Amino acid sequence: TLCILYQQQNMTFSLYKYYVGEWETTAQFGDVNNDGEDDIIFFKENPYTIEVYLNRGGLFYDHPDETLTFNTTMFLDYVLDFDLDGWIDLMLFDTNIRTIYYLKNIDGVFKNENLYPVLKTRYPFGCVYYCKIDSDDYWDIVQLNDGYGPYYNSNETYLWFAKGPLLYNTQPDYILHPGWNPYHAVFTDFNQDARTDIAILNWGTYYHCGVEGHGYNLTIFYQHGDGHFNVHPDLSLPVEHYTSPVEIGDLNHDGLDDIIVVEHNITIYFQYWPEWKIPPNVTLPDDFSVEFPARVSIKVRYEENFGKVIKYQWVEDDGPQMLNVTEDSFYLNFTPSSPGVYSISIRVEDEYHFQSEWNEINVTVFPNKPPEVKEEYILLQMEEGGSCRINLTSAVWDPDEALSFRILKEVEGILISEEKPGVFSVLPERDLNGMYNITFLCEDPFSNTVFINVTLNITPIPDQPRILTVNGKRIVGGGYFNIREGETLWLNFSVDDPDLKWEGDTLTLQASWGRFRIDGLSAELSASQRDVGIHTVVFNVTDRFGLSDGVKITIEVINVNDPPILIVTGIKERINLSEPLTVHFNESYDPDGDLLMFSLRIDNGSRMAVGDHFTLRFASAGVHVVEIMAKDPYGGVSSAEYRITVVGVVEAGGADSGMNRVNRWATIAIPFIVSAVLVCLLYIFFLKRRNSYRDEE
């Protein structure tokens, strides 16, 4: 029989009874058909049946509006809108196969074909609760092992967090240890931190402030962060034996949920913290992240209130294994074993055993990454002949690892050496200039590498060219070369100019004497008679910047005697017998400038000296051979031979014949006679001068 007590206006109740049959063990309420009236859902054990009685304005039929029968040990757990579609659904639990089922409500009707398995649990017995624990809007599942059957003395409570409507992991997200044999739980925000906490009633062994105890007790788990709990209870309250299920409510209107348990008498636990019993306060830094495998250091701060802190406890709630753990009252240090999220909690206890809440911090250890390049391209300016320093430590950043640097490829002409890690000295060769690319490789201990490109701009400083040798000989203070007239002199200059190698410089050779022909760094002199003598020549080598070097060289052109140049005018090939022939040599000259002497020979006769001209009258007709010769003082000779035809008849013994001979003799003899007289006069003059000097002495 279902009995309903309807409350009246005068604080009295009216009793209504409805016969519902046998073996009804559970009744739950909910608006099945969404008409605004709470309906009744019955559960029967023999057979396993669900019956729905619809509410018709506070009245119910004496028979169910809907009946569903199951062929297995199915129990009704909860009536809730599990799939969030606006219709209340049923959650059932099959103890034989340890499976939670979901019976979907379709337009106010339940049917067996709408029964779906949700989750398979470990224990066939125990209490299963549905509540919203974390911050999403989905129904989470909590299962207690109540300690009956083969699972006696279990101390495990499972938490499954919904990943979506009716979506759960196959394994529990949390395993709590409230003590042995938990059998009832309630859910509320005990500490007013906007998070749902859990209170579990159990019988058997329990833990309080780290001390093991025995008997019935109520354990409380505070939620630390979104869906995070410590595996052991934060608070334990001893209760009497055979305590009934626990309930909660704010009984004294102080804004805190109080606890009601039914022992032999009703016991109320008012929740409060007297001012003189304030536990220590614990402060952890905000969640942070580091790069693997950097060592992690967490500093905790706590404030002592009523008593002195005597105990602290670090607990790793979740995450990979911590290695090389060291801890004290202020620090926790560890080396992460792998990347991941390390969830760590701490709680402190004072001398009066008042404990702080668990404070949790999440340390995210992300995989090792290559060093971060802040400056991928670096431009350095320097002058030719100088040096500079490259500091790569500011161009690459890695928060927790030592970096090594090395040059990827040597650059010709530049000496690069590492002074200290990341700092390189750069020393170019003398006179090196231009743009040069240098690539450095940066590597961390895990072989992660990055590249840094450095462009070195060396501004040129022009260098003065320097003449080293002339024709392979070093010139110191001046040089000397000589050639003979008619020969050719080559002067080859070797010049040192560093700009030629690196800058493509051009050199120009110049000579102060224009007789030299310049070809690159060579000078050519073809000596002639006019070049005879000693000449001082300055040679200058000038680059494109106007810088030059000079050398003074003495050039001696040695004379080579040249034969005279004989030029004869007035000669005739044919004349009359009585016709005079006047011949001139005054246009003749000696290339060396020497004084010339002329001679004449007729018909292979004796050679006669003549001046720069002469006149002939031939005594007989016929062909006469006239040879004229010019001679310089050094034996240089030039001669010319002419054949002259003389025509005409002369009477034998006639006056004309005698006169002709006289004239010819006179013409030839007179110059010799005059020369002899002059020589005699000069000789007499010198004799008189010598005698006068002797008389004076």
Image (cartoon, rainbow, N blue to C red):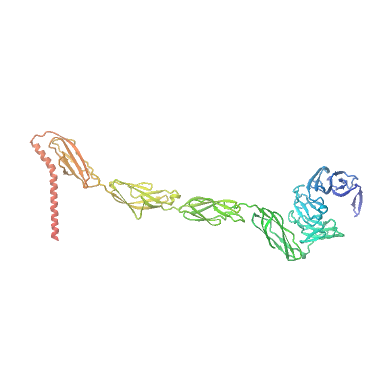
Q: In the image shown, does 422 or 672 lie closer to the viewer? A: 422
Residue 521 in sight in this render: yes
Residue 103: quadrant of the picture: top right
Residue 92 in sight in this render: no
- The C terminus lies in which quarter of the figure? bottom left
30 vs 348, left or right, is right
Residue at screen point 87% across, 49% down: 25
How many marks on residues?
A: 0
**Where residue 295 sits in the image (x, y, percent)?**
65, 57
**Where residue 153 sits in the image (x, y, percent)?**
81, 55
Q: In the image shown, does 100 or 146 lie closer to the viewer? A: 146
431 vs 54, left or right, is left
Residue 350: quadrant of the picture: bottom right
**Where residue 418 sits in the image (x, y, percent)?**
53, 56
Q: Hey, which residue is sitting farthest front in the picture?
A: 150
Q: In the image shown, does 322 or 289 lie closer to the viewer? A: 322
131 vs 407, left or right, is right
Residue at screen point 52% across, 53% down: 380
**Where residue 398 sits in the image (x, y, percent)?**
61, 54
Residue at screen point 10% across, 39% down: 661
